[in-house]
Amino acid sequence: MKKNLATLIIVCLVLSSCKEEKKYSDYKKDDFYEVQGIVTHAPPTDDPFDLSVAKDVHYEYFINREKPLKGIEENLEILENVNGYPVVILVHKDNETINFYSRIGLTENLTMDEKKVLEKHFQEQMDIEKKKINKGI
């Protein structure tokens, strides 16, 4: 009986300490600002029951920093391959590690440093595509 009670208490403690990750809808829209990001990779989800277009989108944001921050948005329905695409990321005003994928595209207020990073990134992407074409891939 003591063993069962101890096990029950441990299970309750573990379950009560598990916090559900907050969603964007748990915050106020005004708590966030937009920054530029780039998709680093977007593999299909691991769940075999998800739609074939469901992807886990991995991205970097604050791309002009020496070490950009990384984020992931899981289970997004995206038809095309978005690897290397520019994306807009919503970042919490008080904690820049709280972030959410907003959309594919560019922010309205790109800095010169961000433009340079994007230009370099796009040039690298074009060079990779040229090599593929030259190799007949």
Image (cartoon, grey):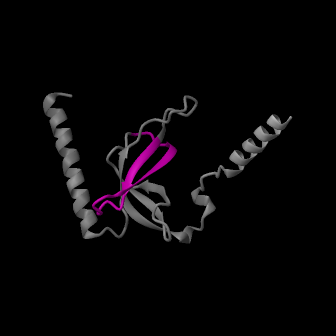
Q: Which residues are magenta?
A: 56-80
Residue 58 drawn at (x, y percent): 41, 47
Q: Check the picture and name the quadrant holding the C terminus.
A: top left
Task: Single out the residue that lies furthest toward the left.
Answer: 134
Q: Quadrant of residue 136?
A: top left
**Which residue is found at the position 17% from the left and 44% from the top?**
127
Residue furthest to the right in view is: 1
Give left or right: position of 67 versus 131.
Answer: right
Q: Which residue is at a point 37% across and 68% down the rendered structure image?
A: 108
- Residue 13 coordinates in the image, percent (x, y): 72, 48
Q: Nearer the viewer, residue 55 or 53?
A: 55
Q: Is residue 124 above or below residue 106?
A: above
Task: Tell whether position 76 is magenta.
Answer: yes
Q: Main secondary structure of the magenta part?
A: strand
Residue 115 is left or right of residue 109, and the answer is: left
Measured as percent of width and height from the top left, residue 98 is found at 50, 60
At 61% from the left and 59% from the top, the residue drawn is: 25
The residue closer to the viewer here, 68 or 54, is 68
